[in-house]
Image (tube, helix red, strand yellow):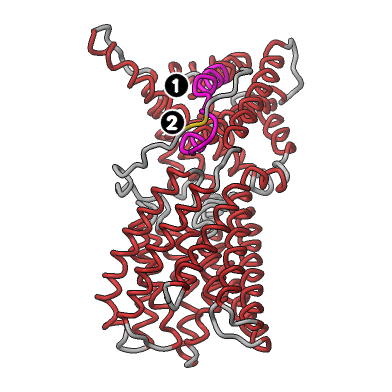
Amino acid sequence: MSSAAPSPTPARRLPLAGVLRVGRPSDIWFKPALSVVVAVGVPNLTLLALGRLDLAMYTMAGSLCALYAHNLPYAARARALAWVVLGMLAAVAVALVTASLTSSAVVLVAVGALLAAVQKALCDATRIGPPGPVIFAFISSASLFTPQTLGQVPGHLALAAAAGAWAWLVGMAPGLVRPHGPERRATARALNAAAAYAEMSVAPSASTAASAEASPTASAGRERARAAGAAAVHAAWQSLFATGARSEPRRALERLVVRAEIALAAPADTDPGRLRSWARDLRGTGPVPSVEPASAADELLGVEAERAAGRRPLADRLGPLLPLVLRTALGCALAGYVSLALGVGRPYWALVTAASLYQANITLTWSRGVQRVVGNLVGVLLFAAVAPLAHLGPAALVLCCLAFNFGAEALISRNYWLGSICVTPMALLITEFTGFQRPGELMTDRIVDTVVGALVGFAAAVAVTNRRAGDRIENALDTVERAREHTARLIAAERPAPGALDAARRRLAAALVELRATADAAAGEWWQRAVPTERVLLAERTGHRTLATAVRRQGLHALEGTRA
């Protein structure tokens, strides 16, 4: 480790090119889209039939929990969704009790900012995944500004709990048809990513000057492909470790993920076409492709050894998130107070806009801010076009909201701003469940709060520096080095313990994935120590070489070569 203190990284140019670029949709975009329509639709249509659409905001709190955990295996999804529902109920309970005890907007904004910060910390620490803390912040902030009496709170919480239970059932229902669907998708992604890396690694290279000139670009492309493959394989193992009993389909999936690992370590002896064929077979509902174990019982013992290692304690995962949590608390509070000072009637919209910005670093936060502003402004125009239709009656209002729910989830995986185009009119229409309002006033408030929330929220991100980003890189480098040395010792051992080398290999791969994610996050931060790029690249190269050596030591390299 160098004894010289690196100089702080100055402010970088904030990107505009590519921020609004539309990507490919998620391979399961229709699942959250359909789930949220069913989860929201049944309670809302029931309230509509009862003539109590004014209570829809409380059922929405539970219904929107159906957006979470779609990538998790069903055993893990059951637990995650239950915690999501309980977390939502806890946030709503705090918000409703606060609203019943005070009408001070200053106090309400402060409580909303604190709730948003806690939600950010827990969602990031548990890695619950999209849509992250934004839904929690939206519901709890709206609940804070809903007039309430203490006696009404239990009934309103009961409505949210009933809708949350329904959302849990909706989220679990696909498991009746395709019980191993999430694991199959994760394994297919790993196989495709490994195939892409293998294809790039064995691509023919001429010795001409032109190819030599292009080699740095090609090398960078291979490094990105290898990092993407390693991340996909790690995600596949995490998905498999999150399942319950090790059934035969799950064991077959494990053997396929091992094949993806082999491809990353020994791309020259890999048949990419075979990997892609297995991935295609996993997309359907047919049986999992049968592949012989790569290392017999040793492989299975390695899987069990890694499962027994467990995850880091929650407290350890919360520590590095402190700067992001402080940004959220400060940005949300200031955004709400500026909105109040401007006389906007719904300051919680500014608060939620600020809460939606905060990503892993300042550069990503800036990009999310641009996407949020563009999406919201276009969404306001869409609301202006749809408002006359929605105002035809309560039924039309509910149906329009359901359509925008579907549209938001169908588009948001292509780019955040596309999803925001549907989220914005949906949020505006939800405010009219208690009675139709003047569209012009709603649109003005939304535009002002969007601009205020984005500007103030980003200013808070710049003001709260993340000096810990550099420390996290050092810790990640140390973790990789320890994992590499441990793996190297097992490679050199004459007879390592059964399963030990398999488990060590996967732990090293996981450490390399974490190092790449940490380095990417730190690269977009301001006012911190310079990222030790050369050390990171060296650690990645030596780590992947050790992985390849481990594969050869286990005999997997030769085995795959005979089957290609």
The residue wearing badge 1 is: 270
Q: What element carries label 1?
A: loop
Give the image location of residue 236, x and y in percent. Answer: 55, 39
SS majority, magenta: helix
Q: Establish if 486 lies above or below 338.
A: above
Assess whether mark 1 and mark 2 are in contact (beta carbons under 8 angstroms): yes
Start-end of magenta stretch: 520-543
Instruction: Please name the residue shown 26% across and 83% down the image.
Output: 388
Q: In this view, does 203 lie to the left or right of 231?
A: left
Q: Where is residue 37 in the image (x, y as percent from the top left)?
A: 43, 70
Tell me: residue 258, above or below residue 128.
above
Inspect this view and state whether residue 73 appears. no
Which mark sits nearer the N-terminus, 2 or 1? 1
Query: Looking at this view, is 166 or 483 the one in front?
Result: 483
Residue beneath disc 2: 275
Q: Residue at x 46, y 67 (%)?
A: 338
x, y percent for residue 69: 55, 56
Query: Where residue 76 sits: x, y (%)?
Result: 63, 53
Three-letter amino acid code of the residue under disc 2: Leu
